[in-house]
Image (cartoon, rainbow, N blue to C red):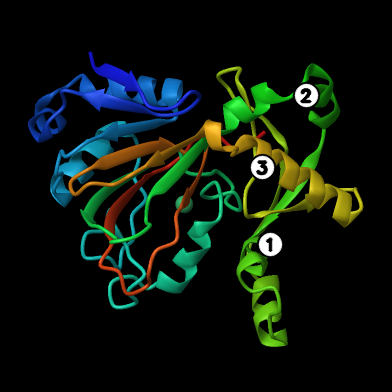
Amino acid sequence: MISLQKLGATVGAEVLGVDRDRFVHDEDLPSACLQALEDNGVLVFRGVHLDDQTQVAFCNRLGDIHRFPTHPIPEISIVSLDPSKSAVAEYLKGTFDWHIDGTTDEVPNMATVLSAHALAEDGGQTEFASTYAAYDLLSPDEQQRYGSLRVLHSFEAHQRRLNPNPSPEVEADWATRPKREHPLVWRHRSGRCSLVLGATASHVVGWDIAPGQKLLEDLLARATAGDRVYRHEWSLGDTVIWDNRGVLHRVCPYDPTSPREMHRTTILGDEAIA
Ligand SMILES: [Fe+2]
């Protein structure tokens, strides 16, 4: 059993009374966390100071983990804007926009676990908004009208927000990157519905580009309006888990020279968007 305290109106809960020792020894903690994640979208463990081995061992009990064979610890990715610490530092600037991880993958990630090892002096907070709540917010008429729409998600759409005037070489590279079409409304196995939105959402399939983009922007703005967002102000040793199936997230901009360093583990999904 775990004790929870709600953090936001529609997303986020702090898990109380769990220390590092419980991550190692509490046999019931993983299943309790998975249920709490489904119910709350984001779980916050303050000041638990998980070392990498403990984080990986715990994540192995949440599900299958994404492994990077070239990383010193294959299950851990270092999130940093310092290119000497992260090979994808430049790409990480794209995470300043609201997004869902893995929308161009066949099956998006189920959850992400992030632990704070060094902090930014300014910025670097992580913000979350529920995409289940975004669907519930729609009027019955909107739910009906948008229920059959399909949206193209692409790496290119995400990158174009960062670089609106790309060179022909850059555009040619984008064209080779993944694209994937998804329904706007994800009808989950659980019976719940969520909206699939964010920086990779390019346009509504079969619509003129401009009105489709306007609809996607409008829905994103409503989903992420201030009172619907939980903003996590990191302290050293915090661990946060979010449910990528029902949550949009973004990081608040911070200086590229910042020491901010997060250790990330990704839990694989087993449910395609449908
Ligand atoms: Fe992300």
Image location of residue 161, percent across then percent down: 65, 65
Residue in the image at 59% along x and 49% along y: 103
Disc nearer the start of the sequence (2/1): 2
Q: Residue at x 25, y 41 (%)?
A: 239
Amino acid tagged 2: Gln
Residue 164 image position (x, y, % from top left): 69, 73
Residue 157 placement, left or right of 10:
right
Q: Of circles 3 and 2, which is in front?
A: 3
Q: Position of residue 187 (x, y in %)?
A: 66, 26
Up the image or down, 62 lies above or below 117; here it is above
**For residue 157, which numbered disc appears in the image?**
1
Q: Are marks 2 and 1 in contact (CB under 8 Å)?
A: no
The residue identified by callout 3 is 221
Residue linked to disc 2: 143
Work out whether residue 107 or residue 7 is closer to the camera in this orientation and state it: 7
Residue 147 in the figure: left or right of residue 254: right
Relative vertical location of residue 4 with respect to residue 200 in this rendering, above or below? above
Q: Nearer the viewer, residue 265 or 106?
A: 265
Under mark 3, the amino acid is Ala
**Are discs 3 and 2 less than 8 Å apart at CB?**
no
- Answer left or right for 254 relative to 153: left
Q: Picture coordinates of residue 4 (x, y %)?
A: 29, 19
Look at the image and tell me whether residue 103 can be seen: yes
Describe the element under mark 1 as helix, strand or loop: helix
